[in-house]
Every structure is written in C-alpha cells, then in structure tokens.
Image (cartoon, rainbow, N blue to C red):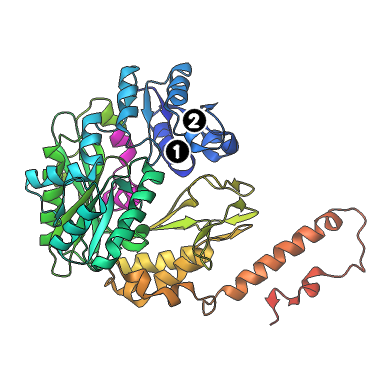
Amino acid sequence: MIKKILVANRGEIAVRVMRSCYEMGIRTVAVYSEADRTCRHVLYADEAECIGPASSRDSYLCMDRILAAAKKHGAEAIHPGYGFLSENAEFASRCRDEGLVFIGPEPDTIIRMGDKIQARATMIAAGVPVIPGVCEKLNSPSDVVEACNGLGYPVIIKAARGGGGKGMRVARDASEVVRMYEDARSEALSSFGDDTVYIEKYMENPHHIEFQILGDRQGNVIHLFDRECSVQRRHQKIVEESPSPFLDSDLRRRMGEAAVTAAKYVGYEGAGTVEFLVDKDRNFYFLEMNTRLQVEHPVTEEVCGIDLVKQQILIADGQGLAYAQEDVKQRGCAIECRICAEDTDNGFRPSPGLIRQLTEPQGQGIRIDSAAYQGYEMPMYYDPMIGKLIVWAARREYAIERMRRALYEYKMTGLMTNIRYLRHLIDAPQFKEGVYDTSFTEQNQERLKKRKGYHNESEDIAAIAAYIDYLMNFEENSSDEKDESALSRWRAFGLQKGVLRV
C-alpha cells in the first residue's frame, strides 16, 4: 500500500485529498508557492516544501521542482488534484520515469482524450453519439469560414486543448466567423499554450450533464451516475446537482452505458468524467472526457456514499474496483455551490483580500470543502474560488431548502463574494422547479444581480456594524478601568437592541 503521497496542488482540493489520505493512514506532502505559505493545505499536511514564487509557471506548473520535492520527502505517489498539471501527459510520464505513481490515467489516455479533436474521432469510433462538427485541424480563416458554411449556423469554435470555458466563441452568422476564430485562438494560446481550434454545431440551450466513471487496471469500468451542470456563466459552472432533475430513468441508463462504453474503449484507469450535451428532445451527445477529478465530485460522493479520492488511490495502487455497477445506488439529492471571491456587480472580477470574519454554516446534511479560514488572505494569483458548499437531503425540494438556509448562515467580511448572487439563484423559480438549462443565468441576469429584496440584508448590515463596534471597543472593554461615560458604538451606528434603524 502507498504510504506517502505528495499533493501537487493547492488550496481546497489539496486539503480534500489530504483528508482522505489521513483516513487511510497515508502521510502527505504539501507543495506551496511563496504566496501560499499560510494556506490551509500547508498547515494540514505532514510535511511541506516551498517550490517557488507566486507565479504558477514558476511553482505549481514547474515539473522539475515538484518531482524534486517528491524525491526529497520520500513520496511514493503524486496526486495532481484538478487544474495545473492534472491533465498533463508529460507530467504523468515523468512521474513514472522517476519511479513515482501518478494517481490518474495512463499518459496515452490523457493525450488521446485531452485533445478534443482526437477525442471526437475516438468516440465516433466507439459508437458514442457526437455533436456534428469538423474534426480536422483548421489552419486558416478561409478554412474556418468554409467549414462553418458547410455545418450551418450557429457554430461554436473551441480550443482543442481547452477547458473551463476558455478558448470558446459562438458565431451566429458568416460575418462573425473570422473575428470569433481569432479570439478563440488567442485565448487558447494564452490559456493552454496551443492555439489549435475546431468547430462544432452550436446547440441552443442544451442541458450539460456529466457521468462520473471509475476504471481499474483489470479492465473493469463502472459509472456513479449523473451530475447536472447546466447552471453556468460564460461556460463556467456555478452550481451542480445530482441527480439531474431533467433525466428520466431510461435516459439515465442509456447515458450511463454510453459513458462506460467510452471509458472502456480508451482503457480508462482511475476517476474520470464523461460529459454530454442533451437537447430539448432528450438526444444526448458526447462533449468531452475529463481525465481527472472534477471540482463538483462531492455531489456524487454524497448521493452514492463513495469516497472518490480513496478509490483513485486504491486503483493507482493496483487494486481492483471495490464495487460492481449493481452495487452503486443514487440516494437522495445533493447540490453544490461554488463560493468565490468575486465582485458580481462588476463583471465577476476577482476580489482577493483578507478574510476578516468568517462564519460557515453548520447542521445536518452540510459539507464545506474549503481552505479558507478567518485571517487568511486570498491571493490574487490563482483561481478566485474560496471553497464549495455542498448540501444533501432525502428529496430535491428539501436539499434546496437546506442550501437556502446554509447560504443564509454563510457570513464573510473583508472581501467581496458571490454568496448573495447564489442566494438569488437558489430562489429562482426555474431552479426550484428543475426546468433550467444552460441559458438559465442569461435569462435571469436581473434577478441574480439585484441588491435588494432578500430578507436578511438588514441583518447583514447589523452584523457588520456590530463587528466594527466590537473592534472599536475591544481595548476599553478589556481594560480594568472602564469609562462609564463612554458613548456606546451601538448608538453611534444607529443601532438599538441589535436592530438597525433605517
């Protein structure tokens, strides 16, 4: 059994991996940049190693430094988390060359499914439905225009090695094609180091539904059912849930079988995700395969009762799957909200800063995957996600009620967050009724951004004023000699008996 793992990542996902390792009796090694010296994953690990300055290129993306840290600390395996080097075939190969276990699929599988053009061709060969498109590499604007005219509009131009909504542009007619092509290439190059793009027929307002899969080295593959990921902004997921309220039992079965077929065809090992788009007539099409753990994996863990990180480690250690397909059941409903340091009133710009006060929700059916703590300063160099709030309940309507309560309890000062935005989202009729698709946030822009109308905003203001009062009075209240004539800050802030006077 693997006894020590280096986690080649940071923040929330690094802590998540380390928690499972601790339960398994496996020691952990954290790597961190100079900007992350006080990050929770550094404090949580058994050992830690600084691997460079704040820039990801010089730290979390630097293979040489990560591999040197693993050898220095005697790690036997490396868990890449998600993002950074998690889908980098060269890194997976170098781990194996250095005698380290890479906790993920084989490098050839990463290459095959990481290139979206090659992945499309592979799925066509496997017999999995694929969105109509152009698989060939397009080398010039004239090639793109000709291909788009042949497909018919609208079309979507996508980065071949893309992800996270980057390097994607929609062209609705011929006049937009060249501009969208150049924009997609430019963003693809800056984000992924490769400006190769391809074209698919753009599906209007589909459902984005993915299936979690597990495969072992003995050729066994199972799926752990579906996640609905249609609540997105600019192709980036905001809220995920399982099971999807859109699927019926027959469609769920057929999509699960297609996901397993896809994984078996490429000899998949470890935890991965097969993503589909589903149109209004319930026709489904392969979108992509993610050869890593997903951000939204906790909703699957909550409804299936299976620790995916532990399964990744056991599979990487050569053990066969602990579950057959008939052993896996969906139980209840789980919903995840991504909590981000963002200014939702100004284009969702990142809002790094010091977390001065933090109150996290508690109670039955609540899980928080986060690396944040009171006094932690969110750095400006990385993704703005603070953490993930996950709730579980026996029925979907109860899970929505629980998420509503949890977001009400979530309090954070010192930086701007998207919590208020998420509160409005959960309250939206389309979401409550489970009849939303990928157009949901665009159709509800005004509702989601409104500042007034939520019942606890006065309570938030009072809480902030009370905290200021506490800070202003801290020194005099802790002194042995108290000035009885001192003016109460509650009165100074217009507060009386804890109620804001407006």
The residue where tag 1 is placed is 14
The residue where tag 2 is placed is 30
Magenta span includes 301: yes
Residue 207, by quadrant, is bottom left
Residue type, label 1: Ala
Q: Position of residue 12 (x, y in %)?
A: 46, 44
Is residue 169 or residue 412 the one in the foreground?
169
Q: How many residues crowd mark 1 within 10 Å: few (<14), some (14–19), many (20+)?
A: many
Q: Secondary structure at mark 2?
A: strand
On the question of residue 101 being in view, the answer is yes
Relative to residue 155, is residue 48 drawn left or right?
right
- Seen at 33% across and 70% down, the residue is 440
Q: Position of residue 450 (x, y in %)?
A: 50, 76
Q: Are marks 2 and 1 in contact (CB under 8 Å)?
A: yes
Q: Position of residue 297 (x, y in %)?
A: 33, 48
Predominant secondary structure, magenta span: helix
Decide: is 445 above or below 320: below
Magenta residues, as a range?
294-312
- Seen at 24% across and 46% down, the residue is 139
- Seen at 42% across and 27% down, the residue is 63
Is residue 488 or residue 202 the one in the foreground?
202
Relative to residue 395, is residue 249 drawn left or right?
left
